[in-house]
Image (spheres, coloured by chain):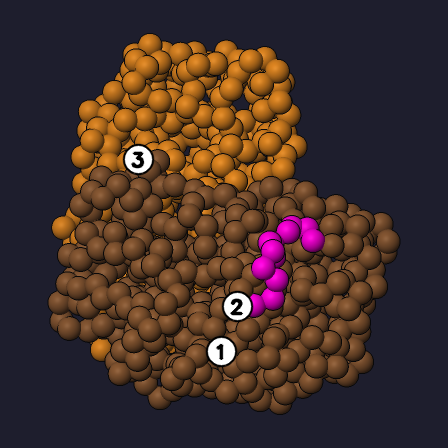
Chain colours: A brown, B orange
């Protein structure tokens, strides 16, 4: 089944002013939709990072994609990985496959070094959707079959400025209001749980002084009770001393502590310090470990007990099923990281989770922060039940693109003016003209 | 695509009297052929370990197989892994998946502990053949696509008693004669290379006193020249002192040294000793590392630089593609182990190798030791060119079972009387009535 066309559509969606140690979310989040069209006129689709960089990266892959058999993915990766602009290669060997190091100091998925992995991942997901549609089976079956029929996600709480995201004709209602203290965080958690049924809760920290974030976590614990596991993720905003203080204050409260301090050395120091203090809280990471090349040192350091994977930048769905085996083999937990995304990415995560036996925690998702008006799937937004998404049983990813909605997303992209993600710039624009990301900050 | 029938056919093939540290090959090698039949009357097939044990193990899996969708493999593994005789489970989770330790002291693939992995592996290969045939793509494409069009194998030299294998109407010509000294080993290598074009050579050692095997390797080096990489595998028959003596004597001669001494601790001591002596020869293993559960200790010990995988007992083709990622991630080499087999197993290895980028050495195969009269594929034996097998481009494994040949294999199984592999018993019968396997022997 030959691929005869590759369509790339840059889109924008309204995004509320969420806060993190990276800065402030812009009024628009950017995504790119990849469509691969087969000679028999089927279409497979995938969603990935947005803006002009990812768009240009994907466009450069066109000569490797068009004319290739949809199943011919290993050689597609070799071609994209080398990214030399050559036509598809047939003599590729493993010696040619590049590897990529972690990128602690860039936004996950935004570094230049691992761009080829992101390009390939989007193409792989679209190709698997295409294959699934051509043979009439769900993507999870192409990955080895499902071990679960429902995939649990975690509520993803954010400190937030007032505002609903978007502007002008794309302005969205602010359904969440300003959230800058423990009471508002608890309110956000309760509303998100009521709407989606989430059974675990994560707070994006690293925004306020640590004592305030400790207070928020304790308030969540008191409000939600022990049946709801809690996590906090300051995106490496804390010194190891601060991380030890927070980790000790939240002993017994956290399911895991995510990226408390920068780098594997920092993570390992936090882990040792917590254990010396009798605190067994596992540490999770999606900044100190962002590629297979990081895994040996991560394991050896003892500073990472849970890897937060992301098929968008680890190199696709099959790569994460392999990461699952790596984690299972070494007794490391596995879950999924998320960036702002729509339903197409969510469904790819769901199929992947279904086919990854060793997925040990509910995954992250930004999905509740996006607005129904921006969804690009026929039938609208993907539904949650009990905090989980049912694994589709239809062919491919189990959804079709709504071409009108996609066109509106593209028009929104053209209108909005944003062409890359720069949370620091937004922070300077709206909060503090001198603001810089500092790691660690506290 | 529902599986409506599972056919199991035990077969026997003539096998010459090959020697190893396990003992002596019997006149017959046993295999089991699994056929899975779909509701639309397609058939997928796989070949695995033979005799009554593997046959009974596979037969017990029938309730998990018949009625299951051919793509529903992850849950098939969970069901087989638990092997409780329950009907297929739909609520299985990763908590249920068992793991298995290494089995240094049993024949590879013959231990009881990892029988479920072998059962599942055979079923997975047959299911993938079935899927490939139903959608018209080769198995390597179902695993992620091919990175190579030809898969290189190594010549597999054996010390050998006179005799061609089989008996009575199944007796085969002795094409190789008695091989018990360096001159005969060199002759065997030359003839095997002339017939198959192999570009690397392995000697099954641990049979004669080490000095004689060193002499054989040096004779091979002198006769074949430096362009042909050499390996020796005594199957853990040597003490670490002996292994150091052999490894030092063969410094610069070996591509890798395979399983010189028992267990990871022994392997690690050999590796350290060789490095202290300035010898960098990598160590390979298929006895100290036979499952994912062994991998962390294998890596940590420093005693294994190359894992010799075998999809028949590691848990199937997808499991080995995952092992490939594990090995790539940790900088460990990967190749393939072989037991006596026919063309169906060979083709499964070829598809797997095609879809495993990180396969770093030519794989083992016993195939040259089997006779054309025993092959079970339509069209007869798989062909080698330049020591390699071309990756089939047809659907599934790229071959069909010759049902007449399969029936003859079954009749041979019924006639021959062998029901399990016992190389020690053969040794006692033909060589030394007191013979026992001793590890290490020298």
Q: Which residue is mark 2?
A: A25
Q: Is residue A27 visible?
A: yes
Where does the image place residue A146, in percent across and percent down from the top left? 45, 72
Most foreground residue, B408 or A10: A10
Q: Residue drawn at (49%, 37%), measured in percent from left and top? A: B332
Indicate whether A181 appears above or below A328. below
Q: CA distance from mark 2 to mark 1?
A: 9 Å
Indicate whether B431 appears above or below A31. above
Other residues around mark 3 within 10 Å, as few (<14) / some (14–19) / many (≥20): many
Q: CA distance from mark 3 to mark 2?
A: 55 Å
| On-image quarter of the C terminus of chain B | top right
Element under label 1? loop
Most foreground residue, A415 or A61: A415
Q: Residue drawn at (57%, 43%), measured in percent from left and top? A: A296
Element under label 2? loop
Q: Which residue is mark 3?
A: B153
Other residues around mark 2 within 10 Å, as few (<14) / some (14–19) / many (≥20): many
Q: CA distance from mark 1 to mark 3?
A: 60 Å
The chain ID associated with circle 1 is A
Where does the image place residue A411, in percent across and percent down from the top left? 29, 76
Q: Earlier in the sequence, mark 2 or mark 1?
A: 2
| On-image quarter of the N terminus of chain B | bottom left
Q: Is residue B171 left or right of residue B32?
A: left
Tell us which disc is closer to us: 3 or 2: 2
Contact between labelled residues 1 and 2, with CB atoms less than 8 Å apart = yes
Most foreground residue, B66 or A15: A15
User: For residue A165, which numbered disc appears in the image?
Assistant: 1
A439 is within the stretch colored magenta:
yes
Which residues are the magenta region?
A430-441
Check chain identity for marks 3 and 2: say if they share one. no
């Amino acid at each position: 089944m030959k691929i005869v066309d590759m369509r790339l559509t840059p889109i924008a969606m309204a995004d509320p002013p969420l806060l993190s140690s990276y800065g402030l979310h812009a009024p628009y989040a950017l995504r790119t939709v990849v469509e691969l069209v087969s000679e028999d006129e089927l279409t497979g689709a995938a969603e990935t990072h947005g803006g002009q960089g990812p768009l240009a990266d994907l466009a450069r892959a066109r000569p490797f994609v068009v004319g290739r058999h949809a199943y011919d993915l290993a050689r597609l990766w070799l071609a994209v990985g080398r990214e030399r602009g050559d036509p598809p290669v047939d003599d590729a060997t493993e010696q040619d496959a590049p590897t990529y190091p972690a990128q602690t100091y860039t936004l996950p998925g935004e570094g230049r070094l691992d761009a080829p992995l992101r390009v390939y991942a989007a193409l792989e997901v679209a190709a698997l959707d295409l294959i699934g549609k051509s043979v009439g089976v769900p993507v999870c079956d192409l990955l080895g079959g499902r071990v679960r029929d429902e995939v649990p996600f975690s509520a993803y709480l954010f400190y937030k400025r007032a505002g609903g995201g978007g502007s002008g004709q794309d302005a969205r209602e602010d359904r969440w209001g300003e959230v800058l203290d423990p009471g508002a965080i608890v309110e956000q958690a309760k509303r998100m749980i009521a709407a989606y049924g989430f059974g675990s809760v994560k707070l994006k920290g690293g925004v306020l002084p640590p004592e305030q974030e400790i207070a928020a976590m304790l308030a969540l614990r008191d409000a939600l009770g022990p049946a709801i596991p809690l996590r906090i993720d300051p995106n490496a905003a804390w010194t190891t001393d601060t991380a030890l203080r927070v980790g000790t204050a939240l002993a017994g409260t956290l399911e895991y502590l995510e990226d408390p301090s920068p780098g594997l050395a920092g993570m390992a120091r936090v882990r040792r310090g917590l254990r010396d203090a009798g605190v067994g809280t596992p540490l999770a990471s999606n900044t100190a470990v962002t590629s297979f090349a990081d895994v040996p040192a991560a394991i050896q350091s003892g500073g990472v007990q849970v890897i937060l994977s992301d098929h968008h930048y680890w190199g696709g769905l099959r790569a994460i099923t392999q990461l699952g085996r790596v984690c299972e083999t070494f007794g490391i937990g596995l879950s999924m990281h998320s960036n702002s995304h729509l339903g197409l990415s969510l469904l790819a995560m769901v199929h992947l989770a279904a086919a990854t036996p060793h997925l040990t925690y509910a995954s992250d998702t930004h999905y509740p922060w996006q607005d129904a008006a921006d969804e690009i799937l026929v039938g609208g937004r993907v539904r949650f039940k009990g905090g989980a998404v049912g694994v589709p049983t239809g062919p491919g990813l189990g959804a079709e693109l709504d071409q009108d909605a996609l066109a509106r997303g593209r028009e929104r992209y053209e209108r909005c003016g944003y062409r890359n993600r720069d949370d620091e710039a937004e922070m300077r624009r709206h909060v503090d003209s001198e603001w810089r990301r500092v790691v660690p900050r506290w």
